[in-house]
Image: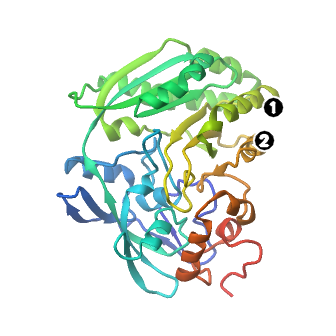
Amino acid sequence: MKAVGSGHSFTDIACTEGILVDMGAFDHLVEIDRRRHRITVGAGMVLRTLNHKLAELGMALPNLGDIDAQTIAGATATGTHGTGTRYQCISTAIVGARLATGDGAMIDVSAEHRPDLLAATRVGLGALGLLSQVTLQCEPAFNLHAVESTHDIDDVLDTFDHVAATNDHAEFYWFPHTTTAQLKVNNRTSAEARPRPRLGAFVRDELLNNVAFEALNRVGRAAPAAIPRLIDTAVGIGDRIEYVSPSHQVFCSPRRVRFVEMEYAVPREALLEAFARVRKLIDELGQPISFPIEVRILGADDIPLSTASGRDSGYIAVHVYRGTPHEAYFSAVEDIMCDYGGRPHWGKLHHQTAETLAPLYPGWDDFQAALAELDPDGHFSNPYLDRVLRGAGFNPRG
């Protein structure tokens, strides 16, 4: 039995030949605790809906990724994250949860009741049971001052450690086959909202970042040799936009171009070295790459299967347009990440197994204890979870 949310993950994490449970109806608001800025919602609520409800209540999550199409259960189960040295993944906001276990019991976990199970449930990969609701620690709503600008990639690299350390949220995108990178810096502010003009936002977000980028990728898929020239024409150094908007409107952007993705977390101190190797790889790969390389950072947490568990982390994400061969590219990037003890994003493509992953997580045994208690027979497992959690010797649902 597997639960499915929005189907955003690129792996087979929600697939099953048994019973597939659509959690979409679990999208209700259960309880509001205004004093502690907590909200309890159905696990099938989509992040976009959650963000709007929180805004109406004068609350917000402290950090978000750049896509809001996932359910809260799916996003947290796979360790979805944003960026920021002093911030952590979305899952750290979970302070309570309710789930159905492999023996049919319904249990509530929290910091007061079974904190060990709460820690495992925060990034549970859907392996511990069917999550029906979560309680989230939020904070008062806040605005972000956003600055997005394009620069020479070497200038970005020279200053990125300083930029990341002195701003709330920082990331950059390098456009392969060019010297251009886009730097995005967001900081909390008490200033009134100064949103982008509606027409300008539509042109940038929809026409350029989606319609035009879709067209570039379609042409590039048909004529790969044209990709470097197309990218060089489409982006240029010196562009800059600046605005102030509610946090969720800055963190999240519409993403309508379909792609497949791999992302790895490496120790923060190894991030720029690992990126330099990926950059060199693309120059030598012999396969033009149309999608930018995304680079983010995140503070350490104590969640057993979080990719930032026990260490400040840097993230490198690589993408290709749907229908484009990716195996050689992704495998070569993965080899680089493994040199640094890289941890793969649980919802994105990778080739790791339980045997290769276990040494990478200080809380691996803690999660295995929770798994053995809640679903020893693998009722909520599948071939993907057997591979990455159970190991080669597991006899599923025996």
Residue 132 in view of the camera: yes
What type is the residue that disc 1 sits on?
Answer: Leu
Say what secondary structure mark 2 lies in.
helix
Nearer to us: label 2 or label 1: 2
Q: Nearer the viewer, residue 89 or 229?
A: 89
Decide: is 355 above or below 294: below
Q: Nearer the viewer, residue 71 or 168?
A: 168
Say what secondary structure mark 1 lies in.
helix
Q: Nearer the viewer, residue 386 or 367?
A: 367
Task: Give neighbour class at mark 2: few <14, some 14-19, many 20+ (Cα, 10 Å).
Answer: some
In the picture, measured across the screen, residue 95 lies left or right of residue 34, that is right
Judging by the rendered image, the residue that carries numbered circle 2 is 332
Image quadrant in which you'd find residue 236: top right
Quadrant in the picture for the N terminus:
bottom right
In the picture, measured across the screen, residue 162 lies left or right of residue 231, that is left
Decide: is 224 above or below 36: above
Counting from the top left corner in percent of width and height, residue 164 is at 48, 30
Counting from the top left corner in percent of width and height, residue 34 is at 18, 57
Judging by the rendered image, the residue that carries numbered circle 1 is 285
Q: Residue at x 40, y 38 (%)?
A: 251
Q: Quick check: marks 2 and 1 in contact, CB under 8 Å?
A: yes
